[in-house]
Each structure stands twice: as structure tokens, then as C-alpha cells.
Image (tube, rainbow, N blue to C red):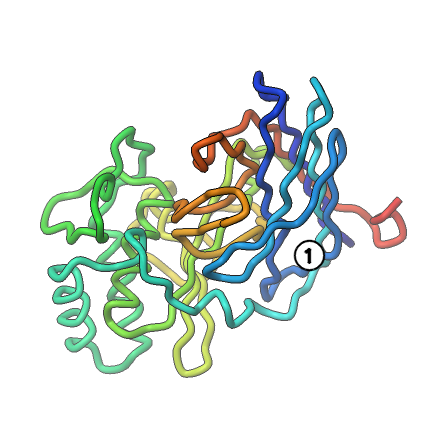
């Protein structure tokens, strides 16, 4: 079987706009095998801090663009490059957050227990929501959340968790992709993200947001507990595409329009997934 994902992007009112699209990321669960786009032409463009490539699509006038991915059922694992930290305002922990992360870590018997404790501590700081103002807006570092709970999406929660983990000296990675809930029969409306840790050769995945959606703060490692499946498309935060004038963009997930000032604007998208037999995968 192969996993096919299609992302249809409605035309922009400015016909000259180009679309930036991530091209897929290998994981232990899947391997990207194929990427293409119709409704326009595309070329690859490089991200300067992580070395990952993205597609820059030039639309045909008035045409919707369809992005297509094909993934295998198994993959080689996450690439080493996702664990390389890059210093920017989305990843640097404020001094108080560093102090808190180190204190939590030093109270644990070993590194694996410390990672679990940092995950639990991050989960206690948030209630799942999509706030208009995010907890780190306007900040040069990821701030420490001292008490109470703060509204946050998967992006916000994982920003805080990654900063905490790295402040304590652990390898951690931020992965973006699509999650298709079981009840939606192969449809979703936007991107999702999760965290990957690596300690003493053990790679673990964490999805706090899905636990909070399921109304539990008993966080277990793994891509759970919400039933469904996912694909990965990109990694890391604070991305720059010099060719496009894009500097320290928070992330890339679903396709986004590049404006004249070098900022990314949300696109109107329809996202679908289907499973296809190997013999039909590239038909």
C-alpha cells in the first residue's frame, strides 16, 4: 500500500503570487516517494539553516494548484538533521525557562525520566485552543510560563516543549505534517506538528496536543492517543529562504503564499488522503 495525499490550493487574487510548499520528510513510519504539482510550474528552493528543500510553485493564471505526495508504508527513520538546534526567537529559551528545565531534569533518576518529566511539565502549562495572540508573540526568546494555564495550539505547546528539552541538553526535533482523524475519513483542514526526542539512541515521539484534545494530561510517548494517521512534510522552526526574501519564518506546513515583503500568507486549502495499492500508486 501507498499513502497518497493531495492538497488543493485555491487561486490567489494576486495572479503573480508564488506558493511555497514543503516536499515531504522521512520518518520511521513512512518514506516520501513522489512529489508533484499541477496547475502551475515549480522549481526547488533551499532553506538556509536546515538545508531542506521546498517547492516554489508559479500558478497558471486563475487555476487552482494541486499538490500530490506519495509515501511508502515504512520508512528509514527521522534524518539526523532534524535534531540540529538553530538559534532563533522560536527556539531559544528565556533564562527562567532554562532554570526551570534544568531543575526538573536534575530531580529525575535518568535522562529518559527527565524527558518524560519535561513533557509533563509542558502539558501542565497549556489548555488546547487556537488563540489570536500566542504566548510568545513579540518575544525574542521562548518565555517561561510561571503559573496557571495558557491557551495554545499544537504549534505553541511544541514550541515551549522543544525550548525546554534543548535547554536541559536533550536532543529534540519539531516536525510538521498532516494528521487525518479517523472520524474524518481521509480529510483534514490544516497542518499538525509533533515533537521527537533522541536520548541514548532511543527515538521517541510526543503529541501533547492530542492528549489535551482527548482531555487527558497523562502524556505517553507515541503518536497517540487520538485515532488517525499522519504524514510528515518538513521540520524545524525559524526558517529562511534567501531566494524568496523569507527570513526566520516560524515554520512551513501546508502550502503558503509568499508576499512581496518576504512573509508567508495562509492559503485556502483542501487536504485529502487515500490508501492506494502499490501497482496503482503512480498511475
Residue 14 versus residue 178 in the image, above or below: above
The residue sitting at 57% across, 49% down in the picture is 230
Using residue 251 as the reference point, say whether residue 137 is left or right of it: left
Q: Position of residue 244 (x, y in %)?
A: 52, 42
In the rendered image, the vertical position of residue 193 relative to residue 163, given as above or below: above
Q: On the rendered structure, is 156 left or right of 30?
A: left
Foreground residue, 279 or 80?
A: 80
Q: Position of residue 136 (x, y in %)?
A: 23, 44
Q: Based on the displayed image, in which of its 4 quarters is residue 51 positioned?
A: bottom right
Q: Horizontal placement of 108 versus 131: left or right?
A: left
Residue 125 at least partly seen: yes
User: Local crowd at mark 1 within 10 Å, few (<14), some, or many (≥20)?
Assistant: many
Q: Of residues 190 and 235, which is closer to you in this image?
A: 235
Tally of marks: 1
Instruction: Tell me the element at label 1.
Output: strand
Which residue position holds label 1? 32
The residue that appears at 39% across and 46% down in the rendered structure is 250
Which residue occupies 30% across, 67% down? 166
Residue 210 visible in the shown view: no
37 or 161: nearer the eye? 37
Q: Can you say whether 81 is above or below 228 in the image? A: below
Q: Position of residue 175 (x, y in %)?
A: 47, 55
Quadrant location of the C terminus? top right
Q: Is residue 258 left or right of residue 129?
A: right
Amino acid at each position: 500500500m501507498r499513502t497518497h495525499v493531495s492538497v488543493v490550493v485555491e487561486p490567489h487574487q494576486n495572479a503573480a503570487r508564488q506558493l511555497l510548499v514543503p516536499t515531504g520528510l522521512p520518518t520511521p513510519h513512512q518514506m516520501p516517494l513522489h512529489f508533484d504539482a499541477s496547475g502551475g510550474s515549480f522549481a526547488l528552493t533551499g532553506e538556509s539553516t536546515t538545508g531542506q528543500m521546498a517547492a516554489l510553485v508559479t500558478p497558471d493564471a486563475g487555476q487552482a494548484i494541486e499538490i500530490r505526495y506519495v509515501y511508502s508504508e515504512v520508512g528509514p527513520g527521522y534524518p539526523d538533521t532534524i535534531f540540529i538546534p538553530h538559534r532563533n526567537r522560536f527556539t531559544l529559551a528565556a533564562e527562567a525557562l532554562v532554570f526551570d528545565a534544568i531543575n526538573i531534569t536534575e530531580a529525575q533518576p535518568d535522562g529518559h525520566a527527565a524527558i518524560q518529566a519535561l513533557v509533563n511539565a509542558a502539558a501542565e502549562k497549556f489548555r488546547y485552543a487556537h488563540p489570536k495572540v500566542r504566548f510568545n508573540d513579540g518575544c525574542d526568546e521562548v518565555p517561561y510560563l510561571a503559573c496557571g494555564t495558557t491557551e495554545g495550539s499544537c504549534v505553541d505547546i511544541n514550541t515551549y516543549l522543544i525550548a525546554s528539552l534543548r535547554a536541559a541538553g536533550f536532543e529534540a526535533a519539531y516536525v510538521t505534517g498532516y494528521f487525518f482523524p479517523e472520524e474524518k475519513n481521509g480529510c483534514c483542514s490544516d497542518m499538525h506538528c509533533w515533537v521527537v526526542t533522541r536520548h541514548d539512541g532511543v527515538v521517541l515521539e510526543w503529541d501533547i496536543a492530542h492528549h489535551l484534545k482527548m482531555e487527558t494530561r497523562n502524556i505517553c510517548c507515541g503518536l497517540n492517543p487520538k485515532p488517525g494517521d499522519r504524514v510528515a512534510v518538513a521540520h524545524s522552526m525559524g526558517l529562511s529562504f534567501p531566494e524568496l526574501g523569507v527570513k526566520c519564518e516560524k515554520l512551513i506546513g501546508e502550502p503558503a503564499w509568499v508576499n512581496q515583503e518576504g512573509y508567508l500568507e495562509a492559503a485556502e486549502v483542501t487536504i485529502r488522503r487515500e490508501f492506494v495499492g502499490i501497482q496503482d500508486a503512480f498511475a
